[in-house]
């Protein structure tokens, strides 16, 4: 039947006119494309529906599986730990009243037990903590900046660092590296960057211990780089914020040669300090330059002026703008100078005529000596004084102890009388930041005292509240000392937050004590502090397993006219009457008596 239908179609196609045949032939591809697209779309939707149906079934099965696991396994494990916590909490709650009673009865012993640990932490442990600006962030990535002798072409730089790349890549901790040799001349910001520099970005393999992995990789790379003579290196980590180098030593003096000598001596002396790595001075070897030293006696003999001769040499070598060419609104400078091929060598420079327009030519070598020397790499001024800056990183030690060692080494160095030094970098930023945070902490405590004095209408109660802040430092210093964490900005921010938490807790306790004193006029003076803790469970109330926060205050949540603090009436027999007494609890709060 299929064959007969197609034969019938072709017979009818022959009988049709040429116009119909042409239209059918031209329209057949579009019809075929429409059918294919429709079939493909139908197939895609069928597959997608089956896929999402399967996905929903699997998702429901997984949810049911995890629900069963939680219900029969994980919930029992969680309940086990919750029960342990509840037992410990209940024991602590039961011991709390007796501890308060003992503390109120032995005030001197309590003060000694508080003051002695505080003095030990402040006087003994705190000076051993050390300090730094911010804690190091180990991201599994660092940079190795290599510097070759100035004047090295970028091709030679790339060729020399090629074995270094292979050495770093062969380290077991390294996953990949990327290298940039040279620098864009339009983006050079200092004399240390150029065709003779390269930067290798090292990415480490993911691991569960990134700190030890990074330290091991850095130690291996430093050991291997020491085998390459003539190459200086600097290792840095990517940071989220812009900070200075951990250790920056500024040596100030006028004489550049003496300044360079002292800086090199300082680099050698600082390299002996343990924990100080990647030591580098900004006074490196300078660029080669041609120096022209004029002889004033010879100039006077020829009747020449040193200023005129210097200007002539400068104009011939660098050029001089003689005039400007005007083209519509544009002005183009016309630079006049000697051709490059006439000054390509030192000998050509010696033969430059410094007496143009005179009766006879006078070559430059007749009135000056021309030498090729090495100029300074840079002349840096700090506070209007010539300075050399030595940069160094820290490995395995805190910033404050390293700074003390650097200061001791520099004090023992032999420097000219007019030279001085100063330790800056992150050490100076750390001092400024920590001083600001100390001031912020003291200012916060003072403002809290002022506000509480106005709220409590007393100068004694705010003082009692703030007296708890110093004792919070005991735990902070002890934990920092045990874990070997130095003081930094993050630690001080945590101390400020801790002070707020301690003050908030003390405010709740003191305010509750004052409320109890106002409502228990017949109680002893020692009762309210003992009753300011958590209320004791009521044996007639089966809801005592629920803990009511002390911050709710007495009677929180009760209805109007309801004597029970939780808003529920007690069940009494009809013949039982409620007789309040002066020493009782008018609000129905069952608290632990101080006695």
Image (cartoon, rainbow, N blue to C red):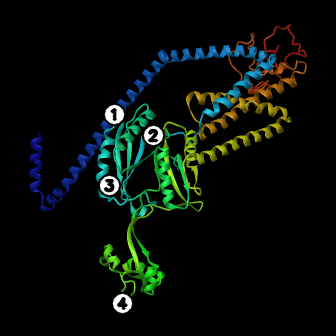
- Nearer the N terminus, badge 1 or badge 4? 1
Q: Nearer the viewer, mark 1 or mark 2?
A: 2
Tell me residue 394's x, y (percent): 50, 41
- Nearer the N terminus, badge 1 or badge 3? 1
Tell me residue 71's x, y (percent): 49, 17
- Nearer the N terminus, badge 1 or badge 2? 1
Q: Is residue 434 left or right of residue 206?
A: right
Question: Label 3 vs label 2: CA separation?
Answer: 28 Å
Question: Label 1 vs label 3: CA separation?
Answer: 56 Å
Question: Label 3 vs label 4: CA separation?
Answer: 48 Å
Q: Nearer the viewer, mark 3 or mark 2?
A: 3
Residue at 9% of width from left, 55% of height from top? 14
Residue at 79% of width from left, 26% of height from top? 512
Tell me residue 227's x, y (percent): 34, 44
Residue at 80% of width from left, 20% of height from top? 108
Question: Label 4 vs label 2: CA separation?
Answer: 72 Å
Front residue (pair 583, 448): 448
Residue with the mark numbered 3:
157
Check disc 1: other Cα within 10 Å, few if <14, some if 14-19, many if 20+: few
Q: Nearer the viewer, mark 1 or mark 4?
A: 4
Residue with the mark numbered 2:
139
- Nearer the N terminus, badge 3 or badge 4? 3
Residue with the mark numbered 4:
360
Tell me residue 518's x, y (percent): 87, 25
Front residue (pair 516, 488): 488
């Amino acid at each position: 039947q299929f064959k007969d239908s197609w034969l019938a179609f072709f017979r009818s196609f022959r009988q049709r006119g040429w116009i119909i045949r042409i239209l059918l032939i031209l329209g057949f591809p579009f019809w075929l494309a429409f059918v294919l697209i429709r079939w493909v779309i139908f197939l895609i939707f069928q597959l997608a529906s089956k896929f999402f149906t399967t996905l929903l079934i699997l998702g429901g099965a997984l949810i049911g599986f995890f629900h069963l696991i939680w219900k029969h396994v994980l919930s029992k494990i969680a309940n086990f730990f919750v029960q342990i916590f509840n037992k410990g909490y209940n024991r602590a709650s039961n011991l709390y009243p007796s501890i308060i009673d003992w503390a109120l009865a032995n005030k001197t012993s309590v003060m000694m037990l508080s003051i002695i640990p505080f003095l030990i932490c402040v006087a003994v442990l705190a000076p051993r903590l050390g300090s730094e600006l911010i804690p190091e962030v180990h991201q599994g990535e660092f940079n190795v900046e290599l510097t070759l002798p100035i004047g090295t072409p970028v091709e030679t730089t790339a060729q020399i660092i090629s074995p270094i790349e292979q050495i770093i890549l062969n380290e077991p901790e390294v996953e990949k590296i990327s290298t940039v040799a040279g620098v864009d001349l339009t983006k050079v910001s200092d004399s240390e960057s150029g065709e003779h520099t390269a930067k290798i970005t090292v990415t480490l393999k993911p691991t569960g211990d990134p700190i030890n992995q990074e330290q091991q990789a850095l130690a291996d790379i430093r050991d291997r780089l020491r085998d390459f003579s003539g190459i200086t290196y600097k290792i840095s980590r990517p940071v989220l914020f812009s900070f200075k180098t951990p250790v920056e030593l500024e040596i100030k003096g006028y004489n550049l040669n003496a300044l360079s000598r002292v800086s090199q001596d300082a680099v050698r002396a600082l390299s002996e300090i343990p924990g100080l790595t990647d030591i580098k001075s900004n006074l490196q070897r300078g660029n080669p330059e041609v120096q022209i030293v004029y002889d004033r006696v010879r100039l006077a003999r020829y009747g020449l002026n040193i200023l005129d001769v210097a200007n002539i040499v400068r104009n011939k070598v660098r050029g001089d703008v003689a005039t400007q060419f005007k083209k519509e609104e544009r002005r183009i400078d016309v630079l006049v100078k000697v051709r490059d091929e006439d000054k390509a060598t030192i000998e050509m420079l010696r033969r430059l005529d410094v007496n143009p327009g005179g009766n006879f030519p006078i070559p430059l070598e007749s009135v000056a000596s021309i030498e090729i020397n090495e100029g300074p790499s840079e002349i840096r001024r700090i506070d209007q004084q010539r300075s050399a800056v030595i940069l160094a990183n820290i490995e395995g030690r805190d910033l404050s102890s390293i700074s003390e060692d650097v200061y001791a080494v520099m004090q023992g160095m032999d420097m000219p009388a007019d030279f001085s030094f100063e330790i800056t970098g992150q050490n100076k930023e750390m001092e400024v930041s920590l001083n600001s945070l100390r001031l912020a902490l003291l200012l916060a405590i003072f403002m809290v005292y002022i506000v509480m004095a106005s709220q409590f209408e007393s100068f004694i109660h705010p003082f009692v509240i703030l007296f708890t802040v110093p004792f919070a430092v005991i735990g902070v210093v002890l934990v920092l000392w045990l874990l070997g964490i130095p003081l930094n900005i993050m630690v001080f921010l945590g101390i400020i937050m801790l002070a707020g938490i301690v003050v908030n807790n003390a405010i709740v306790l003191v305010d509750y004590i004052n409320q109890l004193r106002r409502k228990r006029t017949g109680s002893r003076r020692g009762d309210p502090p003992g009753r300011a803790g958590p209320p004791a469970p009521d044996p007639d109330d089966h809801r005592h397993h629920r803990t009511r926060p002390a911050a709710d205050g007495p009677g929180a949540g009760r209805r109007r006219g309801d004597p029970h603090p939780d808003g529920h009436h007690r069940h009494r027999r009809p013949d039982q009457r409620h007789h309040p007494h002066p020493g009782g609890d008018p609000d129905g709060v069952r608290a632990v008596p101080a006695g």
